Amino acid sequence: MPVTLLGASEIRALAAELDVTPTKKLGQNFVVDANTVRKIVHAARVQPGERVVEIGPGLGSLTLAILEAGASVTAVEIDHRLAAHLPRTAERHNVPDGALTVVDADALRVTELPGEPTVLVANLPYNVSVPVLLHFLETFPYLQRGVVMVQAEVAERLAAAPGSKIYGSPSVKAAWYGAWRLAGTVSRQVFWPVPNVDSLLVAFERDAEPRGDDELRRRTFQIVDAAFGQRRKMLRQAVAPVLGGSAASASAVLEAAGIDPTLRGEQLTVDDFMRIAASVH
């Protein structure tokens, strides 16, 4: 029998059964539209036989859509009630035995994923979306691509190009791992409760080869944080605390890396920041 999806009335009934009251504070906006979860799965190019990790499956509407596509799912859920109930929901909707593995844990603390999934799919709340994505990309090198639904502001920042107003440290850190792009819009009306903000899909493809080792990444991210911690300041001033303690010492490092010390952080690519980090001795 084919896997079936959750409908809006069943989602509300499940929430009542589990005593889950969705709150905007926790970012709990459940997707109640089948077309939307299928759209996310399509955007992620999920194929039969693939292993997908889903962060924060909640009541399981997106989980079932991934399973419907013939993939297997490792679902990471922080809420013990939801984690315990998800296998029962899967069974009721004709999910084959072994296709779903639930990890009852905080996504920010997970260091192992059963099945080594290659695709990431998620609906992430505003307050944890960037830290969770960066943690997963750093910790699980076998993740090759993914699509996440996040608040529009977060999606636009992750996909931002150097020089744009919304380009910032999340843009640079995300780009360390690969290319990011906006992958679709999502109506507010598909959520329960209806949020006050717009959501977008953002997709990533990991680079074929890593830019550098973990030490270089840490040094690069430290310089990125300094550069964007003092927006609108020249680089030689903003990064001085992490490059020798003075504008003169920072200028020397920047010039050695081929970077104009009078530029601002918003103008630099991830490769520029990496060259600066590599010039530090």
Image: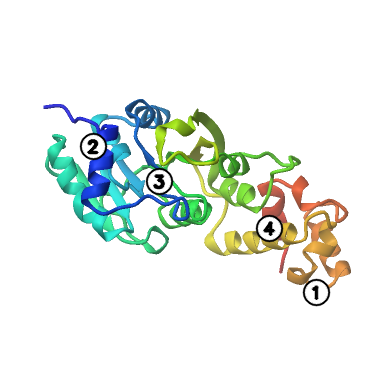
- Kindly state the secondary structure of the residue where label 4 is placed: helix
Cα separation, mark 2 vs mark 4, equals 46 Å
Relative placement, left or right, of 128 versus 260 is left
Reading the chain from its start, which is encountered first: label 4 or label 1? 4
- Give residue 90's quadrant in the image: top left
Q: Is residue 172 left or right of residue 187?
A: right
What residue lies at 23% left-to-right and 37% top-to-bottom? 10
Amino acid type, label 2: Glu
Depth check: 263 or 28 in front? 28
Q: Give how far across and how far down residue 149 sits, in percent.
A: 46, 39
Q: How far is disc 1 from disc 3 in space, using C-alphas? A: 38 Å
Mark toward the viewer: 2 or 3: 2
Residue type (three-letter) at the residue carrying disc 3: Leu
The residue that label 3 is drawn on is 143
Determine whether the residue tagged by mark 2 lies in a helix, strand or loop.
helix
Which disc number belongs to residue 224?
Answer: 4
Q: Between marks 4 and 1, how big is the CA–CA gap?
A: 16 Å
Amino acid of disc 1: Gly
Coloring basis for residues: rainbow
The quarter of the picture where the C terminus appears is bottom right
Q: How far is disc 4 from disc 3 in space, using C-alphas?
A: 24 Å
| Among numbered discs 2 and 4, the one appearing first in the sequence | 2
User: Disc 4 residue type?
Assistant: Val
Q: Which secondary structure lies at badge 3?
A: loop
1 vs 2, front mark: 2
Q: Which is more N-terminal, label 3 or label 1?
A: 3
Q: 76 or 126: nearer the eye?
A: 126
**In x, y percent, where is residue 267?**
77, 45
Circle 4 Cα neighbour tier, 10 Å, few/some/many (<14 / 14–19 / ≥20): many
Q: Earlier in the sequence, mark 2 or mark 3?
A: 2
Residue 124 point in image, percent of width and height: 44, 47
